[in-house]
Image (spheres, rainbow, N blue to C red):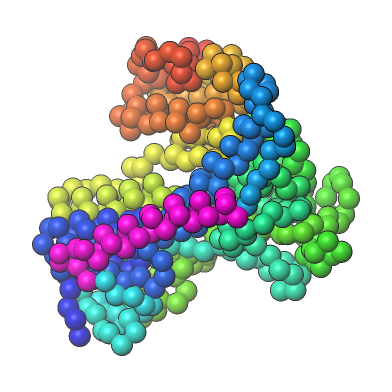
Amino acid sequence: MDTYDAIVIGAGQSGPALAARLAGAGQRVAMIERGKFGGTCVNNGCTPTKAMLASARAAWMARQAADYGVTISGDVRVDMARVKARKDRIVEKSRNGVEQWMQSLQNGKVFRGHARFVDAHTLRVNDDTLTAERIFLDVGGRPSVPEMPGVDRVPFLTNETIMELDSLPEHLIVVGGSYVGLEFGQMYRRFGSRVTVVEMGPRLIGREDTDVSDAVTEMLTAEGIDVRTDAKCIALDRGPDGVRVKLECVAGVPTIPGSHILLAVGRAPNTDDLGLREAGIETDDRGYVKVDDALRTTAPNVYALGDCNGRGAFTHTSYNDYEIVADNLLNGTDRKVTDRVTIYALFTDPPLGRIGMSESEARKGGFDVRVGKRPMTRVSRAVEKGETQGFMKVVVDEKSRRILGAAFLGTDGDEVVHSLVDGSYAKLPYTDVRRTVRLHPTVSELVPTVLGELKPPR
């Protein structure tokens, strides 16, 4: 039996940073990884999708070149094999960098294989038995495959397997009208595929306010994407062109034939085969590990970080989990995951940057809501770039003068949202932010202006 101070299971976004931090503090650390280093973000999430989105935007910009006074002779064509090769090079470099980092840790040892708990302090990895005072889970998640009719009879793609295609789908049917599905839908439409998005709910990205959802829908349909909502009964089948989706919608034909189906209907945590019960580690009804504010599980010496704890399914929240745990253990702080301000993005083009509450959440919360809103058609930077879709929206509580949340749908929206992060953490009154001076010409310079145009919600 090998004894360590700490064992980290999973080399995603929080695991390697934590292993390096603990090893640097003089602890003997074991890193266990059964698959590819880097986790979801590096291998089949942020890194590859944003690389492919960049290729899709390049194709879109080439087609719009004439609007900017630029002439391109001939048709704009996309070579999917080269798009995939570029993506693969970027991913491989990132993945190899993480693995080399872990292999080089002075007080660390890497184990390749599947880990399973024997008890709260003991793990089996292949033929090795490891024990440690503390164990950290960073096991991530995987695409969900729902039990819909026909799913066992029809070939389908997930957000992982679709990026292995080296040819262009003729007609991609995306089942799921949320963040992942919309990013891939727009991406493949710009590559040249016909795209249909099918959503069971009454509108796309139902988590967002209706005005955000409607604007995103308008943006996608303007690019030629067919959107079908209120699809209450979805079934998959083989069709004359490869596959087809049967659905019951308020409007539209009941059957959609296509060449490929992408299931983008959520994710599931990789927690079902770790022997958690033997360690006394509880999960919720969806399989996410239950954790307290310090990310401790129901086995006090075991911590769960990243996607598997259900406290944020993003790279930035996973990395923040590492920061919370490392600070608390090594610096004696009392950081809590509940102190984190919600921030995320939808990386369509233009993107949606979101922080804090939506307007509907704030109103349900009983706040004295005031809303500032400005269309991107009235933002100089957007007009100069020729990208005027979307709007800026900030929600505040008039009574406390707190900034409750914001939605920036438009060019640079994923960057503009950061202009409110520090103020949100510092709990600055919106009046202080309103008095700041920003660089011109940028989108961020209009944030104080929006805060000066607050009105009661309609």
Picture layout, residue 207 above or below residue 376: below
Is residue 280 one of those drawn in magenta?
A: no
Looking at the image, residue 291 sits to the left or right of residue 442; the answer is left
Q: Which residues are magenta?
A: 81-109
Could you say which quadrant of the image residue 279 lies in?
Answer: bottom left
Could you say which quadrant of the image residue 109 lies in?
Answer: bottom left
Residue drawn at point x = 43 percent, y = 13 percent: 440
x, y percent for residue 304: 35, 62
Could you say which quadrant of the image residue 12 lies in?
Answer: bottom left
Q: Is residue 312 visible?
A: no
Q: Main SS of the magenta segment?
A: helix
x, y percent for residue 105: 19, 63
Looking at the image, residue 413 sits to the left or right of residue 183; the answer is left
Looking at the image, residue 113 sits to the left or right of residue 89; the answer is left
x, y percent for residue 7: 25, 70
Residue drawn at point x = 86 percent, y = 45 percent: 251
Q: Residue furthest front?
A: 73
